[in-house]
Image (spheres, rainbow, N blue to C red):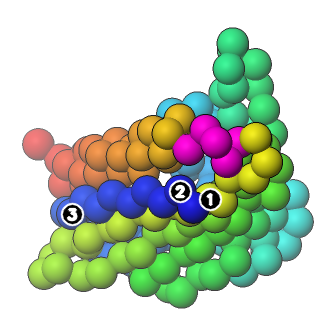
Amino acid sequence: MAIAEYDVVIQRDAMSVYDFLLDARNLPSWRAGVRSIELESGAAGTKGAVYRQTIAGPGGRTLSGDFEITEARPGAEIQYRALAGLERMHGGYYLSTEGGSTRVRFALEREPQGIMARLRSPFRRRMKAEVCQLEQLKSVLEDQLEEQSGP
């Protein structure tokens, strides 16, 4: 089993962070490699919603990275599972309030199968790189807050 997790504290309230994460159209603004995303079925941002996503793959190719929301608890948690792509991971965002800020933990889990089970190290490195993108989420959300408050 390959597992990766990372957390950051964002200077925004939990509902603002949750709403931003729940709107899948925001993914390209903070997750490198996400090329396009659209709702395929279900109600946007709810349990059971399925998104069609294209992501950057090796050699500049684009790959399918479709996913389904499996849990959505307002202000607290969003879980999803990959439906397509080479790496069928599941994971989630877990939020907790810390004063006027929000701690966000991004966790991914994958059970490599077949020949891929022998290549655990590359999977762990990619997964770690994915969860560490929370630093970019922090920058995007805190920059938005500065823009809203003005000079």
Q: Main secondary structure of the magenta part?
A: helix
Image spot of residue 116 (x, y percent):
71, 42
Q: Is residue 130 among what the camera can see? A: no
> Quick check: 67 left or right of 144?
right
The tag earlier along the polypeptide, 1 or 3, is 3
Q: Please name the amino acid that badge 3 sits on.
A: Val
Gap between marks 3 and 2 measured at Cα: 24 Å
Residue 67's place in the image compared with 80, above or below, is above
Q: Nearer the viewer, residue 64 or 136?
A: 64
Q: Secondary structure at mark 3?
A: strand
Q: Secondary structure at mark 2?
A: strand
Residue behind mark 1: 110
Q: Secondary structure at mark 1?
A: strand
- Which residue is at 64% across, 42% downward? 118
Where, quadrant-wise, is the N terminus in this rendering?
bottom right
Residue behind mark 2: 2
- Which residue is at 59% across, 73% downward? 79
Image spot of residue 107 (x, y percent):
46, 64
- Which residue is at 36% across, 46% downward? 132
Tag 2–tag 1 contact (CB < 8 Å): yes
Q: How many C-alpha atoms fall within 10 Å of the one at disc 2: few (<14), some, or many (≥20)?
A: some
Image quadrant where residue 98 sits: bottom left
Q: Which residues are magenta?
A: 116-120
Q: Nearer the viewer, residue 131 or 117?
A: 117
The tag earlier along the polypeptide, 2 or 1, is 2
